[in-house]
Image (cartoon, rainbow, N blue to C red):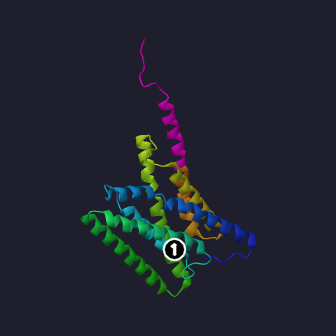
Amino acid sequence: MSDSIPNPVWTTCKDAAGIAGNIFAFGLFVSPIPTYRRIIRNRSTEQFSGLPYIYALMNCLICMWYGTPLVSADNLLLVTVNSFGAAFQLAYIILFIIYAERRIKVRTLASLLGVLGLFAVIAVGSLQITDRMIRWLSVGSLTVVSLISMFASPLFIINLVIRTRSVEFMPFYLSLSTFLMSASFMLYGLLNFDAFVYVPNGIGAILGIIQLALYVHYKKKSTQDSIEPLIVSHA
């Protein structure tokens, strides 16, 4: 487990990176709002899935627990960002349950209770580990697995963009927020000498760069295609 960094300049840079990560993460947390406006307006979840919010809640809870002083040192900015994230995801899940049809409502509620139960087992179980180093390594490993699984989701979007040669399903600002948040927490983890933070967020930053590069490439291509005449006359 890393010790606190006594250098005030170093600490300030680390805190600045963490605060920036919190700010950029907020952009991700509010991104589903247009979807939920539609759900509330139509009073139906339509073909939307609640699973991404279930997974996101689990990820936020594990990362929040890792950031507490009971598990790791000097990671309170992980607690703040993931506390807000968990609150947002819980609100989205509750709204989803309210407007979903009965079959999906029951399944989503069961998944929510399962996530909360699993998190309780992780939290209580880790506290039974009296050796602080082993506790840190155990929860940190879960954090890495959780974050990497979350960051793996853009791979499906990347594949879709390449296959369709369109950025319709990859909003620019969402990709930008993902990259900035991941890069900020990668720097935060590096300055805190915490591999459980900078390794998965480094992977997230790389995936963010790939998304942005694809966006520029296919957006430019779409623009070039759009200036072609709709009807080509032949001599």
Q: Is residue 128 above or below residue 171?
A: below
Question: Is residue 16 left or right of 84 when viewed as pictured?
Answer: right
Question: Is residue 9 left or right of 169 when viewed as pictured?
Answer: right
**Label 1 residue SS:** helix
Task: Say whether residue 160 is visible.
Answer: yes
Residue at 44%, 55% in the rendered image: 34
Instruction: Look at the image and say whether residue 199 sits in the magenta stretch.
Output: no
In the picture, which quadrant includes the N terminus?
bottom right
Q: Find residue 215 and report its horizontal and vertical position in percent.
A: 51, 44
Q: Find residue 225 and report its horizontal and vertical position in percent.
A: 48, 31
Q: Nearest the camera: 219 or 162?
A: 219
Instruction: Residue lying at the far front in this picture: please name it.
Output: 41
Q: Is residue 135 above or below residue 105?
A: below
Task: Say whether residue 145 is visible.
Answer: no
Q: Nearest the camera: 138 or 4?
A: 4
Question: Is residue 108 left or right of 195 when viewed as pictured?
Answer: left
Instruction: Look at the image and say whether residue 219 sits in the magenta stretch.
Output: yes
Q: Find residue 13 and report its horizontal and vertical position in percent.
A: 70, 66
Q: Which residue is mark 1?
A: 64
Could you tell me what secondary structure mostly forms the magenta stretch? Answer: helix
Q: Which residues are magenta?
A: 211-234
Q: Nearest the camera: 115 or 129?
A: 115
Residue at 54%, 42% in the rendered image: 216
Question: Is residue 196 left or right of 86 when viewed as pictured?
Answer: right
Quadrant in the rendering for residue 56: bottom left
In the picture, which quadrant includes the C terminus?
top left
Q: Find residue 76 and report its horizontal and vertical position in percent.
A: 59, 75
Q: Amino acid at mark 1?
A: Met
